[in-house]
Amino acid sequence: MFRMGVEHAKRHPGIVPQMFLICLGMGGAFVYLIRLARGPHVTWNRKENPEPWNKLDPTYQYKFMSINTDYKNLKKEGPEF
Amino acid sequence: MMIRPQEEDEVIHQQEGEEEAAVTAEMSEKIQNYRTAPFDARFPNTNQTRNCYQNYLDFHRCSKALSAKDQDPAPCEWYRRVYKSICPMDWVQRWDDQLEEGSFAGKI
């Protein structure tokens, strides 16, 4: 099957960038979907792990880029109980 | 110095009492200097719904836990201030009514 693909590509070289970009786009979408699914804001198992965001370190950074927020110096605010 | 078992319990109890007093003093200072809800890394996005609900739950859980352990529930005031800052009044009133009736859906 891949050999057919390679033969096609030799005859129509425009296929190569098209396939590459399709793979990049769909791959990127799936990667982001998996990042969202594994994120701390999702509860998959209500019995065992009902609130996974409460298990985070107070300096946890979810976003890729932090401009004004100083994540290193954050602390847990409320009292323990 | 040999400590007998009863004295050991008393020493531990006293140490716990001191720690508790330190925590309460620190919290009451924080509560006095309170301006608004601080940034919470658990909820970094614009949608702060869960932040509101979590603090509401934490306030009630904290009050319940500290009363069960016979400690002063004053430090829980922090959570109350935060949810009062963030939550819409309608929601707070609705949840309070549900709590009174016993039909509140959250786990406290």
Image (cartoon, coloured by chain):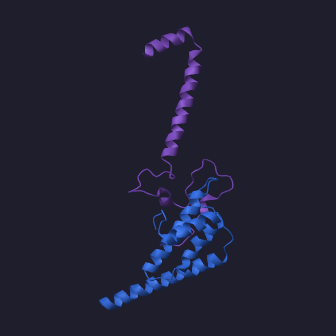
Within the image, what quadrant is residue B92 found in?
A: bottom right
**Which residue is at 35% across, 91% downward?**
B7
Q: Where, quadrant-wise, is the N terminus of chain B in this rendering?
A: bottom left
Note the chain letter of the purple one.
A
How many numbered badges does the structure rendering display? 0
Relative to A49, does residue B10 appear above or below in the rendering? below
Relative to A32, does residue A71 appear above or below in the rendering? below
**Which residue is at 56% across, 25% downward?**
A22
Within the image, what quadrant is residue A47 found in?
A: bottom left
Decide if residue B62 is in sight here: yes
**Residue B54 at what x, y percent from top left?**
54, 63
**Which residue is at 47% across, 56% downward?**
A52
**Residue B12 at what x, y percent from top left?**
39, 84
Decide if residue B1 is in sight here: no
**Residue B29 at what x, y percent from top left?**
62, 79
**Residue A43 at what x, y percent from top left?**
46, 52
Whether residue B106 sits left or right of residue A48 in the image: it is right
Q: Residue furthest front?
A: B101
Whether residue A11 sits left or right of residue B37 in the image: it is left
B29 and B80: which is toward the camera:
B80
Note the chain letter of the blue one.
B
Relative to A73, does residue A64 appear above or below in the rendering? above
B76 and B92: which is toward the camera:
B92
